[in-house]
């Protein structure tokens, strides 16, 4: 007679606790593993978005590869069901090691190999395979304790899995990232994974293993914990080495705020450089080109009240305050850490001429979109500067939408001007002219102009440019005011040339960008 049962009947278990508490402990292991697994996913998504850019694309790649790999892991786990306890503990040890070291691997690949995509894909696949192997093995273990219908067992296991994912998803942005950072947070998660998940099952099902198997698994878990602990001890020197490899020079400040990574190198201008999410924001001999190009072409006209959206480093405000008739400057920036640095760091405060401490300046820490949306209708500004992250970054797409420009236009006084930094026209001409079409779509007349300068940041320095758009309700041209202060790089002739260059390179027929259909991110 042929045995048609899928699995041989399990041998009786010798558990250290009763069946009811044993099931609860297995579900607790499911909870821990799910929380750690989601933290690994979010770590990869966040780091890939930061290192590579375009967060939508990178999140899609990481999650797609990981979900596919989970299917592969589930299939591979079928071969481990006959040794479910040893298989699960081994899987958790490997997952803790790979997940815990994944951030370090991506940073190292980016810093010393110049790219992170292959490492990102490899880590996502390996972590996905190991996460996918967990559920079949845990299902086997929970059924070994007490047989129940498959539907009930799946419901219990998935409930613990989803609750664990919720906790992990909330712990990453609100606890791990701000308190430990990406590198130490991943190492801590790996330690929790191996100690809370693998060790719990190893203790509960120790009677199901031979003495030799228990010894090997204990040694494996101990080795993983030792490796993670060693990596944690070396995390600070590793981060310094990576920062020096990426940024070069003397890295004085490196911190992850709730908004972005902030890095300061050098002591005082011209050696000082400010990087935001790896992109050079200020510094070097030509560090004034961007801010002069942003501010001064719009200051010919009424300018007593000025609004800077972004600009928490105080550099745009520095240029605005050079006009004696400016009565008030309001800066709205979402990053409190950057604002504090602009006030307190000696080098950066000297570079911005201590603009953030000027009595005419009011700093508001808030999301610029939300702040403009709640602005009273009677509160108007003569000039508004959109000194915001590059439009090629997906999370910045809302700042380049018709909705945002409509709100900004509502805040303009009669005869007011809005200036938008719209990215690099040479790198992303379609993105630049899409911003132009978006401004025109809400009734603005636009005057484009391009300011050239060197690019400094990751990789070898190379020439680049900054594209700006001067927008107003009536036709206007970028020009320097008759009483403009002496400037380091911008001249009337250069500004006229910048406007002519932009005018002859226009791309027409582009649709505007909206919140529902963002079109500027990654445009090229």
Image (cartoon, rainbow, N blue to C red):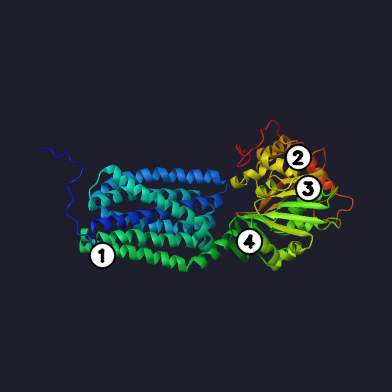
**Quarter that holds the N terminus:** top left
> What residue would you read off at disc 4?
337
Q: Secondary structure at mark 3?
A: loop
Q: Position of residue 205 (x, y in %)?
A: 25, 59
**Between marks 1 and 2, how big is the CA–CA gap?**
71 Å
Q: Nearer the viewer, mark 4 or mark 1?
A: 4
Residue 215 is tagged as 1
The nearer-to-camera label among 4 and 3 is 3
Residue 456 disc label: none
Q: CA distance from mark 2 to mark 3?
A: 30 Å
Q: CA distance from mark 2 to mark 4?
A: 35 Å
Q: Earlier in the sequence, mark 4 or mark 1?
A: 1
Structural crowding at the residue carrying mark 2, measured as other residues with C-alpha within 10 Å and reported as few (<14), some (14–19) or many (≥20) = some
Q: Which residue is located at x 55 percent, y 52 percent?
A: 51
**Relative to residue 292, is residue 136 drawn left or right?**
left
CA gap, disc 3 and disc 1: 73 Å
Identify the mark at residue 502; answer none if there is no mark.
2
Q: Tell me if 124 is positioned left or right of 312 in this view.
A: left
């Amino acid at each position: 007679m042929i045995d048609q049962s899928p699995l041989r009947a399990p041998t009786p278990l010798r558990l250290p606790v009763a069946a009811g508490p044993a099931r609860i402990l297995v579900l607790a292991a499911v909870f821990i593993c799910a929380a750690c697994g989601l933290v690994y996913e979010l770590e990869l998504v966040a780091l890939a978005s930061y290192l590579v850019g375009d967060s939508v694309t990178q999140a899609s790649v990481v999650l797609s590869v990981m979900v596919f790999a989970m299917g592969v892991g589930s299939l591979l786990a079928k071969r481990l069901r006959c040794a479910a306890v040893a298989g699960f503990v081994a899987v958790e040890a490997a997952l803790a090691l790979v997940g815990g070291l994944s951030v370090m691997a991506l940073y190292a690949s980016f810093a010393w190999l110049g790219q992170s995509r292959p490492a990102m894909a490899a880590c996502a696949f390996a972590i996905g395979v190991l996460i996918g192997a967990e559920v079949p093995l845990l299902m086997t273990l929970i059924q070994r304790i007490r047989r129940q219908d498959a539907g009930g067992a799946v419901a219990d296991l998935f409930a613990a899995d989803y609750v664990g994912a919720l906790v992990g998803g909330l712990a990453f942005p609100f606890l791990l990232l701000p308190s430990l950072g990406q590198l130490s947070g991943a190492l801590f998660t790996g330690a929790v994974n191996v100690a809370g998940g693998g060790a719990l099952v190893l203790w509960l099902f120790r009677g199901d293993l031979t003495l030799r198997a228990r010894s090997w698994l204990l040694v494996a878990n101990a080795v993983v914990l030792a490796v993670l602990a060693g990596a944690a001890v070396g995390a600070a020197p590793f981060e310094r080495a990576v920062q020096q490899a990426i940024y070069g020079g003397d890295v004085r400040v490196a911190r992850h705020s709730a908004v972005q990574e902030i890095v300061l190198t050098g002591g005082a201008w011209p050696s000082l450089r400010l990087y935001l999410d790896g992109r050079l924001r200020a510094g070097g001999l030509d560090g004034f080109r961007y801010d002069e190009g942003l501010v001064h072409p719009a200051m010919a006209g009424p300018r007593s009240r000025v609004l800077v959206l972004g600009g928490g480093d105080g550099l745009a405000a520095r240029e605005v305050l050079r006009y004696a008739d400016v009565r008030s400057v309001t800066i709205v920036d979402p990053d409190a850490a950057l604002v504090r640095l602009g006030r307190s760091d000696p080098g950066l405060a000297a570079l911005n001429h201590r603009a953030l401490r000027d009595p005419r300046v009011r700093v508001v820490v808030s999301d610029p979109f939300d702040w403009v949306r709640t602005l009273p209708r009677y509160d108007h500004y003569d000039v508004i500067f959109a000194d915001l992250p590059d439009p090629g970054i997906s999370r910045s797409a809302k700042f380049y939408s018709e909705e945002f420009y409509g709100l900004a236009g509502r805040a303009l006084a009669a005869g007011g001007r809005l200036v938008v930094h719209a990215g690099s026209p040479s790198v992303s001409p379609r993105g630049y002219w899409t911003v132009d079409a978006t401004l025109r779509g809400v009734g603005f007349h636009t005057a484009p102009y391009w300011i050239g300068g060197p690019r400094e940041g990751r990789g070898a320095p190379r020439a680049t440019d900054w594209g700006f758009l001067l927008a107003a309700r009536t036709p206007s041209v970028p020009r320097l005011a008759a009483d403009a202060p002496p400037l380091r790089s911008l001249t009337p002739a250069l500004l006229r040339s910048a406007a002519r260059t932009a005018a002859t390179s226009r791309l027409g027929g582009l649709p505007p960008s909206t919140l529902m259909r963002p079109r500027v991110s990654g445009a090229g």
